[in-house]
Image (cartoon, coloured by chain):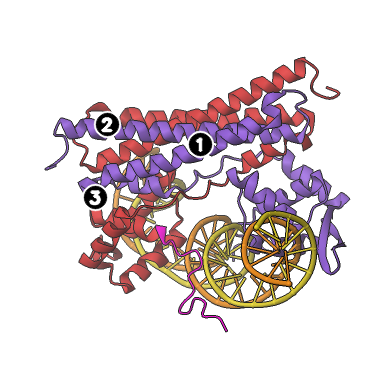
Chain colours: A purple, B red, C yellow, D orange
Amino acid sequence: MKAKCLGKVAAGKMRTLKYAILGLINRKAMTGYDLMKEFTIDLVNFWHAQHSQLYPELKKLTNEGLITFETVLQGEKLEKKLYSITDEGKKVFLSWLAKQDPLEPTPKDIFRLKAYFIESMRKEDILKQFHYQLDQRKEKLVKLEATMRQHPYAKNIADIISPLYGDYIVLKGAIMRERTNIDWLTQCIKEIEKAKKNCFYGSS
Amino acid sequence: MKAKCLGKVAAGKMRTLKYAILGLINRKAMTGYDLMKEFTIDLVNFWHAQHSQLYPELKKLTNEGLITFETVLQGEKLEKKLYSITDEGKKVFLSWLAKQDPLEPTPKDIFRLKAYFIESMRKEDILKQFHYQLDQRKEKLVKLEATMRQHPYAKNIADIISPLYGDYIVLKGAIMRERTNIDWLTQCIKEIEKAKKNCFYGSS
DNA sequence: CTAATACATGTCAATATTTACATGTTGTAC
DNA sequence: GTACAACATGTAAATATTGACATGTATTAG
């Protein structure tokens, strides 16, 4: 009889959403709704979440004693919960932040999966697919660049130790990533068009 | 009483693994083990899966009539299942491949999440974290470039309509992505070091 | 001949995430 | 005053994914 790993099993126990929430609440007290706005505006470029995942997690973190809330009245009847981080929560968050992680598995990407199967694609569809993806990526880049132009940090480089700097570097990273996506798609399209002309391209 | 959406609910019903498997088996008949090798070597750069997800999915696809298998003996006793795609499976796969998808949500990235919270990081840890990530990214890039050098398509550009071309473009894409990651990290490190010298950097 | 590695196939329990369902209030523009 | 958008908080059911558990055979290097 082998020893093996006793105690609770821990399949996929990264709890990253937990730390994302702790980090945000650590900046300042927020309601679930405020948090959702962060997740759909700033964090959307590297960690997205739905409110259906957020609210249960807030309840869990409260039970774990990492955050607390006070009920605040908005108008006459509307109760909202303003969450703050506890000392324990702060400790747990900072310990996570300082941990050095191994490289994550490469993110999944349906378009690249389809590109991998390019030889099975109908010839008329190949360029259509690449152009469609390219257009969407370009649109995304335009939005990211607009956000960057409005970003206070981009105009006025000051202290690294400000929430603005974190904001800025991840936005910068998102723009660089999108530009590379566009470069890759553009190169692919060029190669495919060249092959088409040179008849390296089946019966088309 | 509102009408709403009757019938079966469909939360997160992308079934991408299904199509990845169909695409691979469409190339040639394979066992589950063979498929796993594909998932851990080629597809790892855009769609990874564990065998614990693969085998149940193969069973499901068989039940759905999209693939079939014949049992093959390896040696004296070892039975393996060699899967082939059915006509229906081929149809379903090609229809998925031709579909134009909206942009996927940006992939999740724990390191960028931590970078976003950089202002909460202990000053001694900031550069340590960025260098650690950079080293790992560089190591990954070296491996990808080695794979590229050995890649038959890179050596001898020929017909676009070959599984090799799909292989090649996604590998190319992975290399470009990794180079951009490295550029981003390098820029961040430079900025942080500059800020440190200029004393925009708290008490260090 | 024997030990290690690769081949080969599965299940289980937990976490993670998505989409739809569900409800009600407040502020604002017309 | 009323409609609409934004504010505000949840639950339910399904899919998606992971890590551990579980088992056995075939090949190859020493």
Q: Chain of mark 1?
A: A
**How many residues crowd around disc 2 within 10 Å: few (fewer than 14), some, or many (20 or more)?**
some
Helix, strand or loop for disc 1? helix
Quarter that holds the C terminus of chain B: top right
The residue that disc 1 covers is: A141
**Callout in the foreground (2, 1):** 1
For badge 3, the amino acid type reads Ser
Label ID, residue A191: 2
Query: Which residues, given as a range, are shown in magenta?
Result: B1-16
Judging depth in this view, the residue of B22 and A103 nearest the camera is B22
For badge 2, the amino acid type reads Glu
- Alpha-carbon distance for marks 2 and 3? 17 Å
Q: Disc 2, disc 1: CB below 8 Å?
A: no
Residue A33 colored in magenta in the image: no
Residue at image position (52%, 28%) is B138
Image height of A95 relative to A195, above or below: below
Helix, strand or loop for disc 2? helix
- Alpha-carbon distance for marks 1 and 3? 30 Å
Label ID, residue A120: 3
Label ID, residue B10: none
- Give whichever of discs 2 and 1 has the lower sequence position: 1
